[in-house]
Image (cartoon, rainbow, N blue to C red):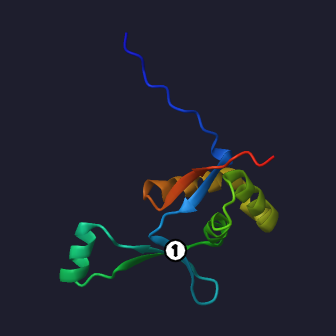
Amino acid sequence: MLRKRQREKRNLLTMVPLLEGRVTLEQGSSEATFLVIQRTNFVERMTIRFLKQPSVRKIKLDKFGAFAVNQMEYKCNVNQISEAMSEHFGEEAEPSLPRLVKFLEILEVHEWIVWDEEEDKS
């Protein structure tokens, strides 16, 4: 009989999100924070060259997204980022974990983050 491939069960709370190599965080004027994404695939390079499109995309983040991406640079796992958001913003960030998970899901769909498994540090 054919067996279905069993997927490895991973705990999202212990996984570490990291920005992909072509994505950087840029602090703009005043409180504006942007994700800067380099446009590197073939079609984008052709549009840059022939249609005079910009070579980077800038995505403006709100204060919660900017805080989460800033925590990613310290290689914090999802649970640590959620706790830090709750501690930093208090009631304003609640519910912090579902909000953070949805934000990370959006970043993952656009391939702007990669996941790293955190080793047991206890």
Percent position of residue 82, x then y: 72, 56
Q: Quadrant of the N terminus?
A: top left
- Side of 31 where 36 appears, left or right: left
6 lies above or below 11: above
Percent position of residue 115, x then y: 55, 52
Residue type indicated by callout 1: Thr
Q: Which residue is mark 1?
A: 24
- Side of 108 where 117 appears, left or right: right
Percent position of residue 36, x then y: 47, 76
Residue extending farthest top: 1
Disc 1 element: strand
- Residue 66 occupies which quadrant of the picture? bottom right
Q: Residue at x 56, y 56 (%)?
A: 104
Q: Which of 74/122 is in front?
A: 122
Q: Which of 105/71 is in front?
A: 71
Q: Which of 32/49 is in front?
A: 49
Q: Residue at x 44, y 25 (%)?
A: 5
Q: Residue at x 24, y 85 (%)?
A: 52
15 lies above or below 7: below
How many numbered circles does the render carry? 1
- Residue 50 occupies which quadrant of the picture? bottom left
Please rate how many residues cluster around mark 1, counting C-alpha atoms within 10 Å: few if below 14, some from 14 to 19, many from 20.
Answer: some
Residue extending farthest left: 50
Percent position of residue 18, x then y: 57, 61
